[in-house]
């Protein structure tokens, strides 16, 4: 059986971030890739889809933005937060862990109560540095498609 693969591009200022639309050396990636019925969401940060700028400099706000983007990307791909079964969260500094988890809980309480009741598998990594110095957190996930 052949796998079905669909990729959902990353757009900034309405321009898909792929060659030749971006300069050589610019990171290119899909916001999500769907293989059969699994959605793989790329790392979401506090970077705006609209212009690429970082929205804030606090852990709470960056985590909220990253989770909001993750929710949007999942929905664009035909899934939802309730379908998340694995998260991978990278922190610039592990001291931000309590604020990150508290923000995650509040976000899920408001947007995906199922993840509060039945949490997904999760891995946390102190990355030391992320794609840009101003990023404090990056989160990626895996989910199943809506049935």
Image (cartoon, rainbow, N blue to C red):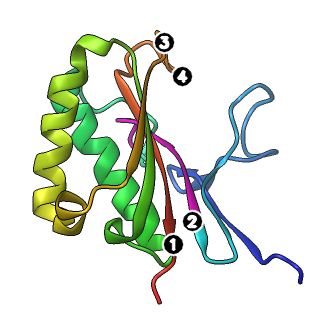
Q: Position of residue 23 (x, y in %)?
A: 75, 31
User: Which SS class for mark 1?
Assistant: strand
Q: Which residue is mark 1?
A: 144
Mark 3 = which residue?
129
Label 3 close to label 1 by CB (< 8 Å): no
Q: Mark 1: few, some, or many residues within 10 Å (few <14, many ≥20)? A: many
Residue 131 shown left or right of residue 2 in the figure: left
Q: Using the numbered discs, state the Cα–Cα distance from disc 2 to disc 4 in whole angstroms.
A: 22 Å
Q: CA distance from mark 1 to mark 4?
A: 27 Å
Asked whether the residues under the numbered discs 1 and 4 touch, taking CB atoms below 8 Å apart as contact, a structural biologist would say: no
Image point (44%, 66%), residue name:
74
Q: Please tell me the numbered disc located at residue 2.
A: none
- The residue shown at (57%, 65%) is 39
Q: Which residue, as the protein is rendered here, is positioned at the far bottom?
A: 147
In the rendered structure, which disc, 3 or 2, sits on the residue that comes first in sequence?
2
For the record, the magenta segment spans 39-48
- The nearer-to-camera label among 3 and 1 is 1
Would you say 90 lies left or right of 116 here? right
Residue 138 lies in what quarter of the image? top left
Q: Is 44 colored magenta in this rendering?
A: yes
Disc 2: CA contacts within 10 A as few (<14), some (14-19) or many (>=20) = many
Circle 2 is placed at which residue position?
A: 39
Name the residue beneath numbered marker 4.
Answer: 131
Q: Secondary structure at mark 3?
A: loop
How packed mark 4 is, by other alpha carbons closer than 10 Å (few <14, some 14-19, many 20 or more), is: few
**How far apart are the two marked residues, 3 and 1, measured between alpha carbons?**
30 Å
Circle nearer the viewer, 1 or 4: 1
Find residue 72 and report its image quarter.
Answer: bottom left
């Amino acid at each position: 059986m052949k796998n079905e693969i669909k990729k959902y591009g990353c757009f900034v200022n309405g321009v898909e971030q792929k060659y030749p639309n971006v300069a050589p050396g610019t990171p290119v990636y899909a916001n999500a890739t769907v293989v059969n019925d699994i959605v793989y969401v790329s790392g979401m940060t506090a970077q705006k889809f609209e212009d690429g700028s970082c929205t804030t400099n606090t852990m709470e706000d960056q985590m909220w933005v990253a989770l909001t983007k993750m929710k949007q990307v999942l929905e664009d791909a035909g899934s939802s937060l309730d379908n998340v079964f694995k998260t991978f969260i990278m922190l610039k500094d592990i001291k931000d862990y309590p604020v990150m988890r508290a923000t995650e809980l509040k976000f899920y309480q408001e947007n995906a109560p199922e993840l509060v009741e039945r949490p997904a598998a999760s891995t946390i990594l102190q990355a030391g540095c992320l794609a840009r110095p101003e990023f404090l957190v990056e989160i990626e996930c895996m989910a199943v498609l809506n049935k």
